[in-house]
Structure formats: C-alpha cells, structure tokens
Image: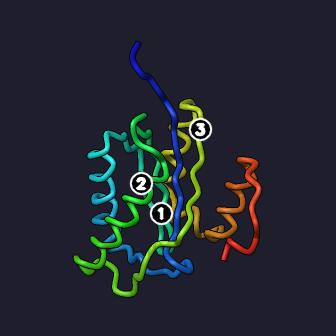
Amino acid sequence: MGTYTQILYQIVFSTKHREPTLAKQNREELFRFIWGILEKKNCHLYRINGVEDHIHILTHIHPTVSLSSLIKDIKVSSALHIKNQKLFHNFTSWQEGYGAFTYNIKEKNRLIDYVKNQETHHQKIDFRDEYVKLLKENKIEFDERYLL
C-alpha cells in the first residue's frame, strides 16, 4: 500500500526579539529562497508571506520529512542566505521557537487569503496578539513568559 497524506500546516515564526528587520523590498527574495527549500524536500507550498517581524508558511509536508527538521533547515539556511546576500541590514537571527498549526484541506482557500493579506491584517493586530489568538484557537497551552 502507498503512503497518502493531506496535512495542511500553517507555520509561523518571528525574527529574534520580534525585531522589525524584514524590509519589504527584499521579502520576495527570502520567500523564493524558502520555497526552494520546501521544493527540495518534496513539500507543497500553498502560500508564504509575512511582515517586518515574522513570516507565515502554508504548506503540505512530505511524509518523509519531520516538521522540526524542516523548520530547522528553513531557519538555518535562510538566516545564512539573508546574511550572505545582505537582504536585511539589521537581521540577526530567527526566534528559537515556532508555531505549527494543522488544518483540514477544506480551509485551504481561507488560509491562502489569510497568509496573502498579512500586511493588511497587521494594520489591525500585532504579531503577539495574532500568535496568542492562533494558540488559543488551536487549544494550545502556552506560557506567557515565552511570548516575548
């Protein structure tokens, strides 16, 4: 029997200390780079976007790839790419943790729109409040101390 999966992940992580270092003019380059990482790992990217202090990745992860190793690869490789290409002047690193939320495939179009419209969305709500909302919606217990 073959292996078949359809797990839609929304992955969210921020810059270290949520510093607003991801300047708009070079974000597309960063997003293309991350898309390349996902393609090499046979993952399907539905949408990637972000603002100055964090990014959202909406993807299906290939069954042979673990979530934690994928995120580690994305963070390490993209941080090196940012520094080598001098994409974002004040970028130091990504935050240590991440959020990963699973959704039914029926939510795909709504989530694509949500990720696509991050700039508009963040005119109304900051990253911390958005992240807490995602954690609560997904019934994930969290410690306020780690939401710096």
Q: Residue furthest left?
A: 85
Q: Is residue 125 left or right of residue 19?
A: right
In space, the residues marked 1 and 3 are separated at their CA atoms by: 18 Å
Q: Nearer the viewer, residue 99 or 133?
A: 99
- Say if 1 sits above or below 118 in the image: above
Q: Residues within 10 Å of mark 1 (few under 14, many from 20)?
A: many
Disc 3 designates what residue? Answer: 103
For the image, the number of numbered tags is 3
Q: Nearer the viewer, residue 99 or 32?
A: 99
Residue at left offset 43%, top offset 80%: 21
Residue 115's disc is: none
* Residue 76, horizontal then vertical, whole percent: 36, 67
Report the quarter where the N terminus lies.
top left
Disc 1 designates what residue? Answer: 55
Mark 1 and mark 2 residues within 8 Å of each other at the beta carbon: yes
Amino acid type at mark 1 = Ile
Nearest to N terminus: mark 1 or mark 3: 1
Q: Residues within 10 Å of mark 3 (few under 14, many from 20)?
A: some
Amino acid type at mark 3 = Tyr
